[in-house]
Image (cartoon, rainbow, N blue to C red):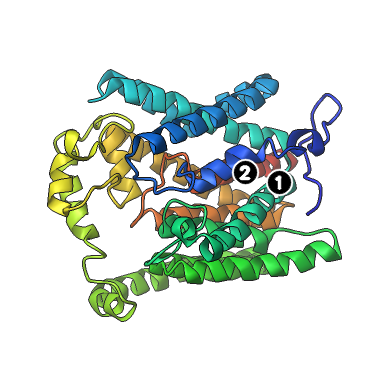
Amino acid sequence: MPALAESPVARPPIAISKLVRTWFILLPLLYYANGGSIGTAATSSSESSSRTHQIALLTVSVICFTLIVKRFPAVFAASLRMKLIIALPVLALLSCAWSVDPRQSLISGITLLCFTLFAIYLTETFTTDGQLDLIMLTGAVAVPASIVLALLVPSIGATSAGWRGIFAHKQQCAGAVTLFLVTAIHWKPKHALARQLRAVYVVLCLVLIIMSQSRTGWLLTLFALTLSGALWLLQKLPAKDSLFLAFTAVPVVGGLVYLFSLLASLILTTVGKDPTLNERTVIWAAAWDAIIQRPLLGYGYEAFWKGLHGASTNIVLIAGWTLFQAQSGYLDLWLQMGVLAVAALALMTLQAGTNAVRSFQRSSHSSFVRWCIVVILCNLVYNIGESDFGYLRILWLLFVLACIGLKKQAGAVLSDS
């Protein structure tokens, strides 16, 4: 794996070995990949598991805070330029004023702000190549470790439903590894050995995705690979031809989505899913009933899901099992922080789309621009049936990195023109 490239700064650059010599900077990334489950189910309610989670979260937060402080002027200046990126953590903090659990919302809001500033720190410290190097290095630890756990310690790394490795759940495993795979495809190794290792890495990613037995992950991987190929082709074409094909694809994709909706029951049955998507449609309906009771501001960040002891009681009773998410990132955002959070996400996505159009054909970092687009669209698709928006997880971190990356690429294009 090559040395990670850092962003140019006024002072002499710090060798990356000083940052990751003991994998210091990788600890938060691996924690976010793990989702904080630390080898146990994320929904575990045992006292020892909860305490382990709290200690790990505190440790990671201290590491992130220390890194942010080292580059605070640059991170603070970038935060002022990235108002939409900061909007969600700020809203999470403010939600303690109306939350059903103010203390939880305040603590979790501070943690989310630290998480977001850590993402900004990465974009201010590393070049585009350096960011992909760092993600590759994270995956180079997480993917093999997951396979080893699934094979040698199945009580931790596997379930009867499929492999999950170091991740909290097989769905999160497949989703995160899909983006690791996408990163490998868009990564540009500088040495022959690195190219050979990338080939092995890609195979390991595919094996883990398949063995997760996550139908969501399989479809997401197919979507990501197809999208990556389509974007590569569009970038190779002249701008006018690329624009024509992109607009032509819109009604085609819309028609396919409509066709899928008509044949959904048959398709889901064919791939081993029930028409309710494992009762997701039932959960979504119950979550919507809760949303319309507090549509504007929600119930407070991370204050809704309390099992049978909070606002989530009715949904848990309807579902018949303990839930800690709405099985939809969009509904979860709305439940926690109201329509304002959904609007903030929509504006982030709209801004990212605008920046993608500006930089798609004109950026000198064409592969990085494609990576950003694929990461954002994969997140938007994944969160239809899973919840990762606004959580301390690797998918949301990569979404934030991609949004910031597109903004910087668009800014560079405008400054050069």
Instruction: Give the amino acid type for the residue marked by disc 2 in the picture.
Output: Gly
Instruction: Look at mark 1 in the image and give the residue it sits on.
Output: 128
At x 45% / y 70%, what residue is drawn? 218
Q: Disc 2 vs disc 1: Cβ atoms closer than 8 Å?
A: yes
Q: Residues within 10 Å of mark 1 (few under 14, many from 20)?
A: many
381 to the left or right of 374: left
Q: Image height check: is 48 above or below 224?
A: above
Residue 286 spot, x, y in % from top left: 16, 49
Q: Image height check: is 10 above or below 400?
A: above
Q: Nearer the viewer, residue 160 or 60?
A: 160
Q: Nearer the viewer, residue 235 or 46?
A: 46
Q: Residues within 10 Å of mark 2 (few under 14, many from 20)?
A: many
Q: Nearer the viewer, residue 66 or 229?
A: 66
At x 45% / y 44%, what residue is drawn? 37
At x 26% / y 74%, what residue is drawn? 264
Instruction: Give the amino acid type for the residue marked by disc 1 in the picture.
Output: Thr
Residue 10 spot, x, y in % from top left: 82, 25
Residue 131 spot, x, y in % from top left: 68, 45
100 to the left or right of 129: left
Q: Quadrant of the C terminus?
A: top right
Instruction: Look at mark 2 in the image and give the residue it sits on.
Output: 405
- Mark closest to the chain's N terminus, 2 or 1: 1
Q: Nearer the viewer, residue 307 or 96?
A: 307
At x 33% / y 25%, what residue is drawn? 104
Residue 219 spot, x, y in % from top left: 43, 69
338 to the left or right of 228: left
Q: Quadrant of residue 63?
A: top right
Find the distance from the CA under tag 2 to the CA under tag 1.
8 Å
Q: Image height check: is 17 above or below 395?
A: above
